[in-house]
Image: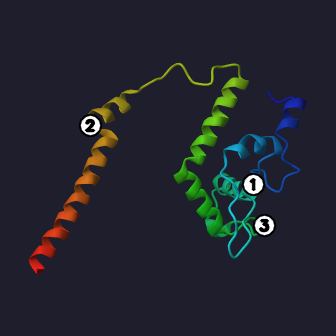
Amino acid sequence: MWTSENRALYDRSTSRYPSDVTDEEWALIEPHLPPQRKGRRHPAPDRRDVLDAILYILTTGCQWRQLPKDFPSKSTVNRYLLDWDYDGVLARIHHALYTAAREAAGRKPEPTLAIIDSQSVKTAEKGGCALIRLATMRAKKSRVINVTSQSTHRG
């Protein structure tokens, strides 16, 4: 329920965009980010600006080329997003915020109940992700065999 105290917690009128992280949110997120990169030709962008740009893209759904000019360049933001996703930084941040939210609500950090619907069970019976991985591995092996067989015929 919206109360005057509650409304003040969610006030974003002082930030540039409603998607920008607050100082309290940044204090929770910053320890999970990798250290600041060193710029080679250009100075490295501030990680908070990069995170604000990523959240702007995700919140508004705008195209990368329409990222406002007061954020770092779209290629820089995209590179950070891909790197953080690949390194598992985003998953760690999500897990840390998820457990903090559960603890703030007076719950245990990890859920104690799991629900599996019939659709998930049907997918698991067919093989799911393991089947896809095996198919990918076979394709890679067959490519290697073809390359070696072609090189022996040329010799």
Q: Which residue is denoted by mark 3 in the rendering? A: 70
Residue toward you, 120 or 147: 147
Q: Which residue is denoted by mark 1 in the rendering? A: 48
x and y, in percent, of residue 120 in the image: 37, 32
Q: Earlier in the sequence, mark 2 or mark 1?
A: 1
x and y, in percent, of residue 52 in the image: 73, 55
Q: Measuring 90% from the left and 31% from the top, which residue is drawn there?
A: 4
Label 3 CA crowd tier, 10 Å (few <14, some 14–19, many 20+): few
Q: Amino acid at mark 2?
A: Lys
Q: Which mark is residue 126?
A: 2
Q: Amino acid at mark 3?
A: Asp
Q: Is residue 142 left or right of residue 63?
A: left
Q: Which mark is residue 102?
A: none
Structural distance between the alpha carbons of marks 3 and 1: 13 Å
Q: What is the secondary structure assignment of the residue under circle 2?
A: helix
Residue toward you, 108 or 33: 33
- Which mark lies nearer to you, 2 or 1? 1
Q: Measuring 65% from the left and 63% from the top, which residue is drawn there?
A: 77
